Image (cartoon, rainbow, N blue to C red):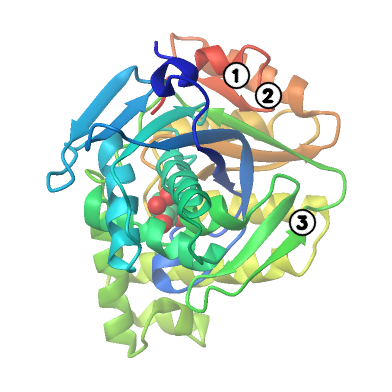
Amino acid sequence: MVTSDSFFGGAPEVNASAPGRVNLLGEHTDYNDGYMLPVATPQRTTVALSRSNDGHFVFYSSTLDANVTFAPEGSAPSGFGSYIEGCIRLVEAEGVQVPPLRVWVSTDVPVGSGLSSSAALEVATLRALRQMLGFELDDVKLARIAQRAEIEFARVNCGIMDQMASSLADESNMLFIDARTLEHRLAPLPPDAEIIVIDSGIARKLAGSKYNERRAECEEASRKLGVTALRDVQDPASVETLPEPLRRRARHVVQENLRVLEAANGVSLERFGELMDASHFSLRDDYEVSIPELDELCALLRAQEGVVGARLTGAGFGGACVALCKAGYAQRAAEAALNEYNKNGRQGRLLIPVPHEGKENNESV
Ligand code: GLA
């Protein structure tokens, strides 16, 4: 493994970082112009930059121990380099001249768990570029460019939630996001709440999953209902007229938006937990993006003392579950649920609260 010092031959010109995100409520709502409530993870991605003196772009991921080198008129092969190159090319498209760079990346945001390691890499890269080159870029525009890097360069047709969360959320508040207007505000977590996140150990393949199919179903449902996006459905009962599976897909989105709006206004810890449970059941039964392992993990979490609710977080089809519990209960509840889940050879692992040995255990970009 190459350290930052040896990669740069001393200190880099700039260093920036950005967190991953855990979405507490509002799943599959962002590409329907809806609402969501993520928080930032304690795990972060760091990007260090210096001007390159051999005329080439050189990217190094210390987490993967992998190198990418290309000439300014060339491009990075797919992999971690395409996210970084995407950010560079899109900043250039904004009229900023970017010199050939050496880029060093390190992260403890787990990959494939649904905690948005890619958004953390994009946002950290853009922050580092902004710092080094001194151009104006507010945090919302930064999130938009990060999302375009993911769509146009990494070829993942994502919504805006992950990049908005990585750019604007913090660890101790929820970030309420309106995906249509990009209005956002920090909202306090329910009183005395603690967050648990457990990776199911089942890798989630967003690009290859049914994510795009769900997006297309939502668009079709909107067309049939005569609205721009499912966020615009005024009467929740109107979705019941749709043919299957559009009826259930639209019902999930409409009800999920209502859950977020209720939670964002401030509810008790117990009520927040009920909304999370309802979200999970809706993702399982109506949106059909859960898998048995996520259902089981959530059920095990709900059975622990102090836990008020649990749901899958992120796109689904694998990845992590998030639970909310009373302050002081997280460690014990998470360990008990995990022990039970990992019987029969499963590979679940605790992500939040961050285990002491967490950094060494995470293999990521
Ligand atoms: C992924 C996408 C997000 C969002 C979630 C589902 O994380 O990147 O834009 O659509 O799935 O809520």
344 over 191 or under it: above or below: above
> Which x, y percent locates residue 83?
31, 44
Q: Secondary structure at mark 1?
A: helix
Q: Vertical placement of 219 versus 226: above or below?
A: above
Q: Which residue is mark 2?
A: 334
Say how many tags the image has. 3
Q: Secondary structure at mark 2?
A: helix
**Left of 72 or right of it: where is 348?**
right
Q: Is residue 29 visible?
A: no
Crowding at mark 2 (Cα within 10 Å: few <14, some 14-19, many 20+): many
The numbered dot on residue 252 is: none
- Amino acid type at circle 1 is Leu
Name the residue: 44% across, 33% down. 113
Whole-number angstrom distance, CA of label 2 to CA of label 3: 20 Å
- Residue in front for this viewpoint, 145 or 296: 145
| Cα–Cα gap, marks 2 and 1 | 6 Å
Residue 49, by quadrant, is top left
Residue at 59% from the left image edge and 17% from the top image edge: 358
> Which residue position holds label 3?
271
Residue tagged 1: 338
Contact, mark 2 vs mark 3 (Cβ under 8 Å): no
Q: Quadrant of the C terminus?
A: top left
Label 3 is placed on what type of residue? Arg
Asked whether the residues under the numbered discs 2 and 1 touch, taking CB atoms below 8 Å apart as contact, a structural biologist would say yes
Please tell me how crowded label 3 is: few (under 14), some (14-19), or many (20+) other residues with Cα within 10 Å.
some
The residue that appears at 87% across and 50% down in the rendered structure is: 191
In this view, 250 is above or below 190 = below
Residue 274: give x, y in percent of width and height.
Answer: 69, 53
